[in-house]
Image (cartoon, grey):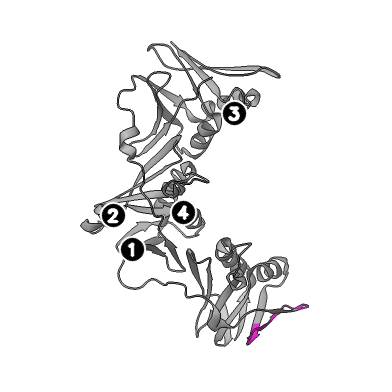
Amino acid sequence: MKVKFNRSALQDALGLVTSIVPSRTPKPILQCLKVTAGKEAVSLCATDTEIGITFRLGQVEVVQEGQAVLPAAKLASIIRESVDEVVEIEAAEATIHIKGADSHFTIYGHEAAQYPAVPGFDGNADFQISLATLQEGIELSVFAAAKESTRYALNGVLWEVKGKKLTLVATDGRRLAKEVVNLESAAAAELSKERIIVPAKTMYILDKIEGDKGTKISVKLVNNQIVFASEQVVISSNLVEGNFPKYEDIIPRDNDKKMSLSTDATLSAVRRAALLANEDSKGVKLSVEKGTMVFSSRAPETGDAQIQMSIDYAGKPIEIGFNPQFLVDVLRVIKSDRFELELGDADRPGAIKSGSNFLYIIMPVNL
């Protein structure tokens, strides 16, 4: 195999492909990439056995077709530090030569036949979605998924497909984010019966795909896997096993204290009030009364903070505590200038709404 790459394009591709390469593994070959050079394009493949990526690069000059398996971290470092516009990679068996105008690296890889198979995208899509729409949905949901949980279903994002709507739901048991997005065309009716839980790691990788406004993602379910494809990239992922909570049961229906708040002003107030919160005080208190909301925290050894904000509210007063980081997380991803806050009793979950498609449920904390 012998290929001349546009270094910048190769570096961009490596940024996505190497994101799934494990830093530690009992199988050293999984720390490598498989490079396949065809007549007109080169494919870069990586897998950690749970997620697979194939990236098709067209900005290449293929001098000799073939395959090579080479260490991902070493290749990425060499390409990142290179100052050349064009980089040549040549492989003979498991020896790889990477050449620039004034540089020549020789690194050792594996036989191409030893690399695990990475699924492609075969047949027709079950549905299509705009990349921009999907990534907006990801950003408004995945942040609420559990980072570590023995309930594996909480480590993923639930996909519910009905007609031309896709509902994305994530929860860690203390908060829940739900966003509804539009599909490009109606999905098959049988998909509405599926409980699809996509790993959070896969969602973050999908959020890294680059494309323009017209880029579409084709989606297909195959056994216990889900496969995504754009013109350049194919991503395959195992689905998360387990039962996702019946999230509809925890959505409050009777919160009667409703107010419209400025997203930026509230984010600033929460951040400032949280400066004096600690593990003992656990959270930030929201004190709401006619025309005013006060964000406060208190730590016995450091002092207390009070941030006052004028609001349009004439309902009953309430005091309620929340984990400030859970508020910061949601306020950072809301795109609109204002959002709706709905509260009930001090021991009941609060709800944050933005537009007609986004809902965030947050459990209170005792202060």
Mark 4 element type: helix
Q: Which residue is mark 4?
A: 203
Residue 133: x %, y % from top left: 39, 51
Whichever of callouts 2 and 1 sits on the residue coming sooner in the sequence is 2
In percent of the image, x 49 and y 40: which residue is there?
333
Q: Residue at x 37, y 49 (%)?
A: 158
Query: Image height check: is 188 above or below 35?
Result: above
Question: Is residue 278 shown above or below 50?
Answer: above
Look at mark 2 in the image and give the residue it sits on.
194
Residue named by callout 1 = 221
- Which stretch appears magenta? 90-104
Magenta segment: does it hold 205?
A: no
Residue at left offset 38%, top offset 41%: 178
- Please, what is the three-letter code of the amino acid marked with disc 2? Glu
- Give the residue type that dot 3 points to: Arg
Verify CB contact (< 8 Å) between mark 2 and mark 1. yes
Q: Earlier in the sequence, mark 1 or mark 4?
A: 4
Q: Nearer the viewer, mark 2 or mark 4?
A: 2
Residue in front for this viewpoint, 295 or 61: 295
Mark 1 crowdedness (10 Å alpha carbons): few <14, some 14-19, many ≥20: some
Mark 2 or mark 4: name the one nearer the start of the chain: 2
Q: Which mark sits nearer the N-terminus, 4 or 3? A: 4
